[in-house]
Image: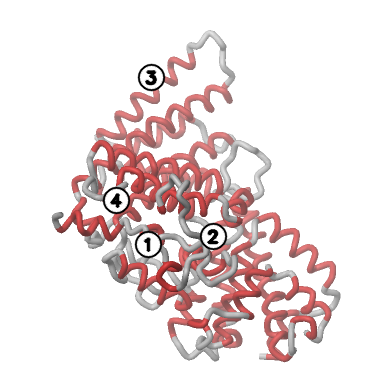
Amino acid sequence: MDAKALNWERLLSPVRRKKEGAESKDPKTVSETRTEIERDHDRILFSTPVRRLADKMQVFPLDKNDSVRTRLTHSHEVSNLARSIGTALAFQHNIASEIPDSRRNIPALLAAIGLSHDLGNPPFGHQGESAIRSWFEQNQSSVLGALEDPQHRKDFLKWEGNAQGFRLVTRLQVLNDHFGLDLTYATLAAMMKYPTSSKDTGDSAATKKHGFFASEQDIAEKVLTKVGLGFGKRHPLAYVMEACDDIAYVVLDVEDAVKKSLASFSDVIAYLRHGGGADELIEAVIKQSCEKHDEYRSSKFALSAAELNDVSMQRFRVEAIGAMVRAATQTFVENENEFVNGTSTKGLMALSKGEKLRGLLKQFGYIHAYTHRSVLRVELQGYNVIHKLMDMFWAAIVHRRGAKDAGSIEHPFTRFVYGRISENYRRVFEHPAPELVGFPQLYRECLLLTDMISGMTDSFAMDLYREFEELRGDFDSKKAWEKVA
């Protein structure tokens, strides 16, 4: 077996942490027909955080149009694209063909990490992440001031949904132990889009953000070591997942903008013609899409303007996604060694012939969707709601310090608020895993706060805020926790 095959053997490791750290209570039965990595996909699919994605915004928050995408539909689409590329890599290009079950495991692993890539996202999308970071920034001296370790402070000042997703599957999805969903090393490594800590972020594709908190750093280090990588080195299939995420959101967010009549098919084509220059891939997508558009326009069914826009964008979606998927697949094959070694400083799409189309569609989406007043209005509302909820939950968490247990928290409002924190998050905080006992209580309290906030859906956050506002009376959350601090 050559060096590349040995690398792939480790990169596709089907071993689980629990089987090394403790006796497994879930042995594989004789009748089990799935590989371990196929089981990972199913564990993720049936987990609670996946279901919550149905009520988390993609672009348009709290939208009443069922055809407009949520984080759940987006995640399923990313998973589908990733699995398709995995199938092409395994069957057409014979990637890792020397490794047993690789033709099953590569598509399954990509489907799993595509499905899980947004699990840690808070309500209200990237504005939710910004709200969490800015709350810690604004309250840095009173909340984080006592944390001596710079990494502990940066975990919250640079708070990341990617790191929260890794924490979810390794720690928070508690059954009867501290192993979370107990996914394989291969899946956990490939999930880490940014295999670095908050204090070691840099300029490369793999380090521009962080992918784990200090609380899970030992887990991340073990995972990366087991698959033959290290901090700052991505799993090769993480590049594929990132490309699928990029492809899905730039194409499908533009399609959603057209569905909401914020732009038209003709607007999209005109923008690409203006910015595409002589790019062959863009020209091919435009030609094929416009031919179908003309065919639909002359249809005997006399389509309305809205129907013509809709069906033409569906065809554009097919052509654009297909072109970029083929470009990404070919680029991975051509640069396999660099991706396998985890040394590429650029993402897969950035190296591909589909990069110009991706970039133009992202710009179009920014102009016509991401900055539309309907989006900005609800994002701002969500931003403010998250700040106020964090004030209230932090008061409840701080008030617990002087109480023997949650039931003896002095003020009835903070006692009520603490009780609204999800039971599994409280269990992880109140009964920490042995490796977390040495962490400062303040650090673990901040984790409890962000666990609760990030786990909310858009609607739940709005409803909970209204409920708290009705019950708090004249209670001033910020004054209350500042006094205790």
In primary-sequence order, the first of circles 2 and 1 is 1
Residue tagged by mark 2? Answer: 121
Q: Position of residue 366 (x, y in %)?
A: 47, 48
Give, as a three-letter code, the residue at label 3: Glu
Graded by Cα atoms within 10 Å as few (under 14), some (14 to 19) or many (20 or more), the crowding at tag 4 reads: many
Secondary structure category for the residue under label 3:
helix
In primary-sequence order, the first of circles 3 and 1 is 1
Secondary structure category for the residue under label 1:
loop
Q: Position of residue 176 (x, y in %)?
A: 59, 69
Which corner quadrant of the image does residue 316 belong to?
A: top left
Q: Which of the numbered marks, if any, corresponds to residue 291?
A: 3
Do callouts 2 and 1 mark residues in contact (Cβ within 8 Å)? Answer: no
Front disc: 4 or 3: 4
In primary-sequence order, the first of circles 4 and 1 is 1
Residue tagged by mark 1? Answer: 15
Give, as a three-letter code, the residue at label 4: Leu
Look at 43% across and 53% down and name the residue there.
Answer: 113
Task: Quarter of the image for the C terminus: give it.
Answer: bottom right
Do callouts 2 and 3 mark residues in contact (Cβ within 8 Å)? Answer: no
Front disc: 2 or 1: 1
How far apart marks 4 and 3 lie (CA) works out to 30 Å
How far apart marks 2 and 4 lie (CA) works out to 23 Å
Front disc: 4 or 1: 1
